[in-house]
Amino acid sequence: MLYKIFCSPTVTKEARAAGDDKVNLLLGNIFAERGMSLPMDIYRSLLQTLAVRPKKKHFKKIVAYIREHEPIERVSPQLLDQLVNIGIN
């Protein structure tokens, strides 16, 4: 359920048709709008779900969110390994 909430945009169909979500991958993401820093377990859960149901755009959204909202010190080596493995697959 968290995966659906995180990856589903809340923008209008017109905005998606205009291509605004292609420029800003986090457009309509309720977590990004609030500038929330999520626990590392949430990212791990999102990536595990992504491994089962792979979608390139959702992978890009998760990576963009981590890059934008997480300081480099908080990103663990295990999370980076998981990102790399899923990105390769």
Image: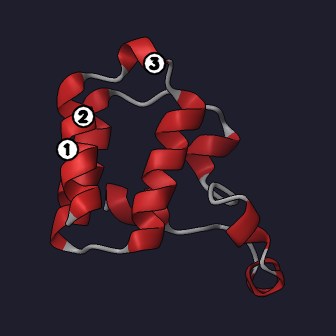
Give the farthest residue toward the front.
88
Query: In terms of sequence position, does the residue under pointer 2 or pointer 3 come before the other?
Result: 3
Number of numbered discs on residues: 3
Q: In which quadrant of the rendered image does the C terminus lie?
A: bottom left
| Residue 8: % across, % down | 51, 68
**Residue 82's disc number:** 1
Is 19 displayed left or right of 29 in the figure? right
Residue shown at 27% from the left, 35% from the top: 80
Name the foreground residue: 32 vs 23: 23
Give the residue type that dot 2 points to.
Leu
Residue 72 badge: 3
Callout 1–callout 2 Cβ contact below 8 Å? yes
Q: Which amino acid type is marked by label 1?
A: Gln
Would you identify the image quadrant in which residue 20 lies? bottom right
Looking at the image, residue 41 sits to the left or right of residue 33; the answer is: left
Could you tell me if the residues under marks 2 and 3 are in contact, i.e. CB atoms within 8 Å?
no
Residue 45 visible, this angle: no
* Quadrant assignment for the N terminus: bottom left
Residue 36 spot, x, y in % from top left: 56, 31
**Which label was assigned to residue 79?**
2
Residue 31: percent from the left, percent from the top? Answer: 56, 43
